[in-house]
Amino acid sequence: MAIARFFTVPCTITNPSQDPLDSDTDAEGVPEVAADEVDTYCHVQPYTVREGEAVLGVEEARRARRFWVAAGTEIRFTSSVTIGSDRFTVAGDPDNWNVGSANDHIEAVIVRQLRPGETGEEA
């Protein structure tokens, strides 16, 4: 069975442009960067640290998830992921698991961003 059967959760990956010409500032001097959005399906599981992996802080670990998407999906450490009403940042570089099989995929650790007024204790 291919790993694609697990990709059942709709998500949107937002990738900021890497071209300096795609950035500007608004009237108040706040930077604006153009971004591409990719609507796709993913698989999400609770986060647990693995041997040899960078350890997240306690507060981040409470909000972190393991995240998988199909091989070839555009995602990098500057990307953000939206699942339902939650927005996540990518923690570190995503890992490409491409060995030429039906189980090729990209794995990342994502951390839910805090909402206004949220302390992180609620996660």
Image (cartoon, rainbow, N blue to C red):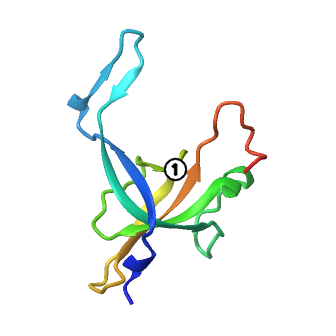
Q: Residue furthest bottom?
A: 1
> How many numbered marks are there?
1
Q: Is residue 56 above or below residue 46?
A: above
Q: Place residue 27 in its image quadrant.
A: top left
**x, y percent for residue 119:** 75, 38
Left or right: where 71 falls relative to 45: left
**x, y percent for residue 98:** 32, 78
Left or right: where 66 falls relative to 117: left
The answer to which of 109 and 57 lies nearer the viewer is 109
Crowdedness near tag 1: few (<14), some (14–19) or many (≥20) residues, C-alpha within 10 Å: few
**x, y percent for residue 51:** 62, 76
Q: Quadrant of the N terminus?
A: bottom left
User: What's the residue type where badge 1 is placed?
Assistant: Gly
Q: Is residue 14 above or below residue 100?
A: above
Left or right: where 66 falls relative to 22: right
Q: Is residue 76 above or below residue 15?
A: below
- The residue indicated by pointer 1 is 84
Secondary-structure class at tag 1 = loop
Q: Place residue 58 in its image quadrant.
A: bottom right
Q: Residue furthest right?
A: 121
**x, y percent for residue 23:** 28, 27
The answer to which of 79 and 43 lies nearer the viewer is 43
Q: Place residue 114 in its image quadrant.
A: top right
Instruction: Report the residue at 45% width, 76% height from top.
Output: 6
Instruction: Report the residue at 59% width, 73% height from top.
Output: 52
Instruction: Report the residue at 45% width, 50% height from top.
Output: 81
